Amino acid sequence: MPSLFVGELEQLVLWAILRLGPSAYGVPIVDELRRHTKRPILRPSVYLALRRLEAKGLIRSRLGEPESRRGGRARRHFALQPAGRKLLRESRRTLRSLADGVVLDER
Amino acid sequence: MTSPLFQPSPPRAAVRLLARRLPLDQRDMIVGDLTEVFLDRVEAGRRWNRLWFWLQALGFAMGFAMASARHLSAEPPRRLLMSRLATSCHQATRRLAYEWRYAAGVVLILGLGIGPAAAMLSIVQRVLLQPLDYASPDRLGLVRIDIGQVRNHPGLSLGEIQDLRKTDGLFDAVEGEGRMSQMSFGPPDALEPVSADTITPGLLSMLGVSPAVGHGFTEADAKSDSPQVVLLDHGFWQAHFGADRDIVGRRVLLNGRPATVAGVLPAGFTLVTGRAVPQPIDVYLPLQVTDFRNFWGYPTLVRLAPGASFGQVNEALQALATALAKKYPEAYSADARLRFVVWPLKDDMLRATRPALNAAVAGVLLLLLIAFANATALIVARLKTRERDFAVRIAVGAGRATLVSDVLMESMVLAACGAVAGAGLAAGGIQAARLLIPHTVPRWDHIALGGNLIAMSAALAFAGLLLSGLIPAWAVSRRLPWQALRTGSVQGSRPERAASRLLLVGAQVALTVVLAFGAVQLVRSAGRLARVELGFTPDVLTFVAPLDRRKYRTAADEALLYEHLQNRLREIPGVEAAAASSHLPLSGSFLTDAWTADLTKEPGWDQALANYYAVTPGYFSALRIPVIQGRDFTDVENRTGQHVVVVDELLARAAFPGVRDVTGRVLRLGWGIPDSRIVGVVGHVRGIEIRGISRPQIYAPFGTFTWTPLNFTVRASGDPSRLAGAIRSAVAEMHTGRAVSDFAMLSDNVAVATSTLRAVTDLVMLLAISAGVLSAAGLYTVIVFILHQRRRATAIRSALGASPGQLVRLHLRTSGVVILAALPVGLALAAGVAPLFSTIIYGVRDRDPASLALAVGIAAAAGIVGIAVPVRRAASVDPVVVLRGE
């Protein structure tokens, strides 16, 4: 039974898929996460997060065409499910209302 | 790497690794993505790309392995392995359930080994190895002193405490405890006895103990001219002040004088200072350290300075002792051989019991060894019955690994059941031990069934699995299938099989001799350890009757009062004897005096010492101490304080070697007592410790010396403790001005002093007996099992008219000869390993012939019974039933 809890990395992956739109597959998702978080992101953990998100029904995937550059292997493209979009909306709202009016020492 | 001739490709082995490790639905995506990134990196001219790919591959393999371990996905190969294990476990369980007698035998043997072993080990761990309730107890030590004849005396004089404090870099703290005494507590019309102790002000902070209420003593409190302050024991505070937290600063009366309560000690606080009999203390008073020497009555604890070891400290103290002997010639004579030894406090506490505890651990190991050896032998023996089964399975294509894993699985099931049985037995054993072990054993309350016990059972069962599982597995793996198939019958008696079977019996017999020998040696030494010669009969009632010194000023007043009291006590119906003495044997307090038979010299404190008792006439008969020569004191001697003494046989022999009758001879004593004539010689009494320190004894009539409070001993017909009421009113008639206290049976004192020793030796005895029984039972089981395999041959012979007697004789001729041949081998082995037992045995010789003979007897008896029982059974069963069972 998939857990309903969505971890931080999983949320970040959801945002990255949303940003990348139709070109979202493994390689650019990792690049996108690295560019924005500015901290080391372990590749296996991203793929595991993708698998978990799919198991939870938050994203779906489809296979592309085999490519010679990939040793004849196909890409797998990811896209958000409605439940994924709903989750991001709610999480952004929660974050805003929680953070609103709170002074954070920026150092 | 970037040669244009070749298409750069990721390392193939890494790709294979990924292909094997990744889930099917993820494989292509991940390998493809990694390949893509790999090429990007190559084209970007980056270095170490193959290494990068390897690291990625390993990361993915590990990540997905961990994820699937967390049940995020169930992978087909893993599921296969699990189901294979489950099947194997199921089959093993079914086989064992079918042969439940065999399974029960192995489980019982393992449980009987593991259970007592785990229980014993956890008791030893709780009692022996757990630290004291003091801060960093490993740095704490107790100072013992050697002076003249006296060795390992657990008390220093105050001057020596000062000397130790002056040393540089050895100790963080040196603190002393004073003599325990009885005091009266409360107003004169409601006196209550309390036991009091004195401690130096720094003692508590050295031990890391802070009072539960209030504060400890300050150096100023200890000055002789400052007002008296007192610390209360937690239990005493609860009982007498209802745990009132406002107690600090309250004034109480001690021996009629006011004292201010400084604080209350934490619950459970006890002072461990090398006493044979730790006794509860109600109140603590401050002890001032002066430069007084010559009275070694202050047990001294030290905390080592950081970086100092006990070895270094003892070496440095050697130099100090030499310097002191030079500096104070009046205190230590030239041949005093003064020496201080600092013992780790924990070691010191368990000094008397350590040999017994070592024996206990050795007994545990012996028991485990026996259990595992027997379990292994039984498992190996049973595997022989499955040879044909294995052969058939190999013939139809079973792999060797499958067979070995089947055997291991059976062992594992048996070990698991053995662990459960062992844990159950251990839990029962702990309960039994709590009943068996008296509460007086140090840290008795720590003996409990703990998690460590369960863990230990599991660990022991795993060890058992390794031992008793791997050997049979190895045996299976080297079987050749056609050999087993060729014979056509499980019970076939090819020469090779018969020889290996007889070899197994022989080895088991030899092993049994060795193990039984160890068990017998342990039982005998446990018996020796527990035997204690007291020299007196302790079933007397004792109590303390102190008196108010302000009312009875002279020794003669006191002697007269006590004589009256003694006579009054003897009038109480049921009282057979009543007497008084300054100290009681094994009570933890004693007085030491020096003596010499050479009247031209003063006795040296560092030479001949004796325990000094002031007693009233009748003391010896009350305690049933035998009078060997001369007589007891007379009432006149007692009252007028004539200078006569009674000595014990040790002193008589030491003072006048070779003299048959020493009565009439004169002894010179210390303490400024005039020379005294010996009027009698009595038996030696264990006065200080059950084992260890024992000193000669000098008895003087009470009138020559006074020592309050005085201990009365009353021997009565029936139960003396019924007399407490009558005794109380008798003392009240005498108006002593102090409360009667400490009603107790002297036998309780003795029980306390011997309790740990007795408890441990009882446990060792139980362990050793079960080890002996188990080793004999193991041999019996193996022989029964092996002969059971031959029941077909036996049945055929029986069908052809052989009588049971003839059959037994037949088997005795084959197996019996092997047993006979193995007995001397076992005997030689036992004699060979005997020195290994020498550290754990006590009072028994290494190669004790009686023990060796008994061990051989046990093994022979188990062997003969093991032959007779199955053969008789096989002969009595209808042969047709046996033969049909093929």
Image (tube, grey):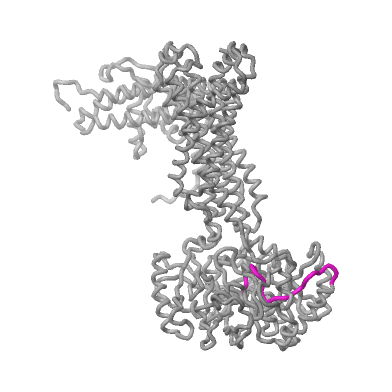
Say if the magenta span includes residue B573: yes
The answer to whether residue B387 is left or right of residue B241 is left
Q: Is residue B248 visible?
A: no
Say if the magenta span includes residue B364: no
* Figure check: B256 above or below B779: below
Residue B593: image quadrant is bottom right
The answer to whether residue B632 is left or right of residue B353 is right
* Figure check: B43 above or below B451: above
- Residue ID at (46%, 38%): B824
Q: Position of residue B74 (x, y in %)?
A: 47, 23
The answer to whether residue B437 is left or right of residue A81 is right
The answer to whether residue B36 is left or right of residue B120 is left
* Figure check: B284 above or below B765: below
Which residue is nearer to you in this view: B798 or B841? B798
Residue B622: image quadrant is bottom right
Q: Position of residue B805 (x, y in %)?
A: 61, 23
Q: Is residue B547 visible?
A: yes
- Residue ID at (72%, 83%): B638
Q: Position of residue B44 (x, y in %)?
A: 21, 30
Q: Position of residue B418 (x, y in %)?
A: 56, 33
Which residue is nearer to you in this view: A52 or A32? A52
Determine the main secondary structure of the stretch shown in magenta: loop
What is the count of numbered marks? Answer: 0
Which residue is nearer to you in this view: B595 or B847? B847
* Figure check: B583 above or below B411: below
Start and end of the magenta stretch? B572-590
